[in-house]
Image: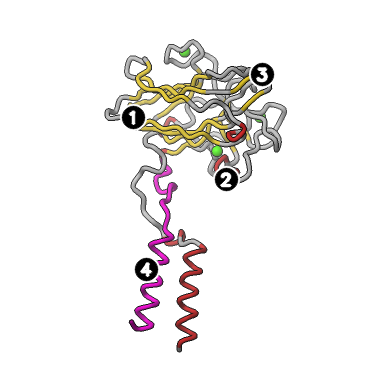
């Protein structure tokens, strides 16, 4: 094999090994509560503790609270946008590193904002996400499903059908120290396009529990979408492999 061919093969191997799926390609339906230029999709300015209702309606969903479990948003109750870190004395979750701070390695996943309940650290919450048109699939994350001295946290994620009854559900693990300040990922992927709403129901034994919700993929399971690799994703390992091949070529000259 000629040196030129070896170099070409090196580039091909480095590129094919090191291109990872790019979730941002299909980011249109991913609601991570991160403002762009300070704004949410409806143009409103993102502020800690602001009520969240129809700011994401251009993506086909609205947010509410369903404490009476009738599948409809309760009048006057709204989840809140919560700023990461100690923004004020009203947090979404407590962690060993302080209020609303992700566990090491999860900082980028949480970003700068997430969604919390109406109040801070009450007794869970009943978040309701209502769809303008039904979906077949969705995914999202509940953060900080952990352990308290007097009990554990646990959540049930429910998919509601056309009549707003429960047609599917996923129960979270019982709270553990491993999930503290970390995400628990859930997803629905149904044979029919029959999910008209998604509801989070707190089922744990611990009280004084907040809701922390983030990275909601409204129309598909995040990561399952067809993706288009982009050149910038060639990783450090890829560059190293390429560099080693190039070095050998130079040495062999
Ligand atoms: Ca976020
Ligand atoms: Ca209701
Ligand atoms: Ca706050």
C-alpha separation, residue under disc 3 versus residue under disc 1: 38 Å
C-alpha separation, residue under disc 2 versus residue under disc 1: 28 Å
Depth-wise, is mark 3 or mark 1 nearer the camera?
Answer: 3
Residue 38 position (above or below residue 71): below
C-alpha separation, residue under disc 2 versus residue under disc 3: 31 Å
Depth-wise, is mark 4 or mark 1 nearer the camera?
Answer: 4
Query: Does 115 appear in magenta?
Result: no
C-alpha separation, residue under disc 4 versus residue under disc 1: 39 Å
Quarter of the image that includes the N terminus: bottom left
Residue at which label 4 appears: 12
Quarter of the image that includes the C terminus: bottom left
Rendering coords of residue 48 (x, y %): 63, 32
Query: Does 6 appear in magenta?
Result: yes
Numbered disc 1: secondary structure: strand
Residue at which label 3 appears: 150
Numbered disc 2: secondary structure: helix
Q: Foreground residue, 73 or 44? A: 73
Task: Decide whether the magenta segment is chiefly helix, strand or loop.
Answer: helix
Residue at which label 1 appears: 135
Q: Residues within 10 Å of mark 3 (few under 14, many from 20)?
A: few
Rendering coords of residue 147 (x, y %): 63, 26
Residue 67 position (above or below residue 10): above
Numbered disc 4: secondary structure: helix
Which residue: 54% across, 36% down?
Answer: 183
The reply to whether discs 3 and 1 touch (Cβ–Cβ < 8 Å) is: no
C-alpha separation, residue under disc 3 versus residue under disc 4: 56 Å
The reply to whether discs 4 and 1 touch (Cβ–Cβ < 8 Å) is: no
Which residue: 45% across, 76% down?
Answer: 245
Q: Foreground residue, 92 or 40? A: 92
Task: Give the image quadrant in which the ligand numbered 3 is located.
Answer: top right
Specify whether 46 is left or right of 71.
right
Which contiguous range is marked in magenta?
1-28
């Amino acid at each position: 094999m000629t040196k030129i061919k070896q170099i070409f093969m090196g580039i091909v191997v480095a590129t094919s090994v090191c291109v990872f799926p790019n979730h941002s390609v299909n980011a249109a339906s991913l609601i991570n509560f991160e403002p762009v230029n300070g704004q949410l999709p409806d143009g409103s300015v993102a502020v800690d503790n602001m009520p969240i209702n129809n700011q994401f309606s251009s993506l086909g969903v609205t947010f509410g609270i369903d404490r009476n479990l009738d599948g409809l948003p309760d009048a006057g109750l709204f989840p809140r946008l919560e700023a990461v870190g100690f923004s004020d004395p009203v947090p979404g979750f407590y962690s060993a590193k302080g209020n609303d701070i992700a566990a090491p390695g999860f900082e980028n996943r949480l970003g700068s904002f997430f969604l919390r309940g109406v109040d801070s650290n009450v007794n869970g919450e009943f978040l309701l996400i209502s769809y303008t048109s039904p979906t077949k699939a969705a995914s999202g994350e509940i953060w900080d499903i952990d352990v308290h001295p007097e009990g554990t946290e646990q959540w049930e994620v429910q998919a509601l059908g056309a009549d707003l009854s429960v047609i599917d559900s996923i129960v979270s693990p019982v709270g553990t120290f491993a999930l503290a300040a970390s995400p628990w990922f859930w997803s629905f992927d149904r044979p029919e396009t029959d999910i008209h709403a998604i509801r989070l129901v707190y089922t744990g034994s611990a009280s004084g529990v907040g809701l922390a919700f983030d990275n909601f993929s409204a129309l598909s399971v995040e990561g399952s979408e067809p993706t288009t690799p982009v050149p910038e994703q060639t990783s450090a390992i890829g560059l190293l492999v390429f560099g080693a091949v190039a070095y050998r070529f130079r040495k062999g000259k």
